[in-house]
Amino acid sequence: MIPTAVLTSFKYIILVALCAASISYTITFAGIFKWLRKILSRWGEWFDELIHCPYCFGHYVVLTIMLTTSNLSSVLVPITTSVVYNFLFTWFCIVCVMSLLHAVMLIAYKPVAELETFRKLKEKKQQLNNQK
């Protein structure tokens, strides 16, 4: 029988990973947040890379979710008696699951991204033809 604490941690990992993957993917790729990416890109190379990488941005999303979780110690994976180690272990378990979800999202949205790229190239070509 699996201990209740482990099951609780497992559910927390899955739920936070789903939420963080969705948030980080949406902010780093969706057109609705293009304005935010432009602003943060001007702040420097580090911010530019962060705001365009769902995996990188996801670490901070997961950390934010974890730090705002009430009664956090009850959902950490209990691998040691140290809360710090349990926190870090749980954080990176969530990031691992989140990265797998990002891979699925990238595959799922590949046709949409290709159509968007094709549309933008077509618009550029029209603009160039209009300038002639």
Image: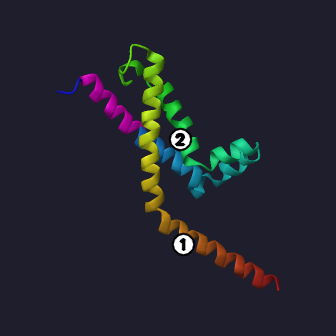
Judged from this view, the residue extending furthest toward the top is 81
Rendered image quadrant of residue 55: top right
- Residue 69 x, y percent position in the rendering: 44, 25
Contact between marks 1 and 2 (CB within 8 A): the answer is no
Please tell me which residue is depicted at 49% across the width and 65% down the height of the picture.
Answer: 110
Magenta-drawn stretch, dominant element (helix, strand or loop): helix
Residue position marked by numbered label 1 in the rendering: 115
What is the secondary structure assignment of the residue under circle 2?
helix
Residue 73 belongs to the span the image colors magenta: no
Residue found farthest to the left: 1
Residue bearing the label numbered 2: 58
Residue type pointed to by label 1: Leu
Label 1, residues with CA under 10 Å away: few <14, some 14-19, many ≥20: few
Q: Position of residue 115 (x, y in %)?
A: 54, 72
Q: Tell me which corner region of the image, top left, top right, bottom left or bottom right, holds residue 16.
A: top left
Which residue type does callout 2 highlight? Gly
How far across and down, in percent of the image, does residue 96 sit? 44, 40
Identify the residue at horizontal 47%, vertical 33% (top origin).
92
In the image, residue 81 above or below residue 10 = above
SS type, badge 1:
helix
- Where is 98 relative to 125, above or below? above
Residue, x 48% and y 18% (percent of image)?
84
Please tell me how crowded label 2 is: few (under 14), some (14-19), or many (20+) other residues with Cα within 10 Å: many
User: Which image quarter is the N terminus in?
Assistant: top left
For the C terminus, the image quarter is bottom right
For the residues carrying marks 1 and 2, which lies nearer the camera in this image? 2
Q: Which residues are magenta?
A: 4-16
Residue 68 visible in the snapshot: no
How far across and how far down the image is residue 26, in percent? 53, 51
Residue at 74% from the left image edge and 79% from the top image edge = 127
In this rendering, the answer to whether 49 lies above or below 9 is below
How far is mark 1 from mark 2, CA to CA? 26 Å
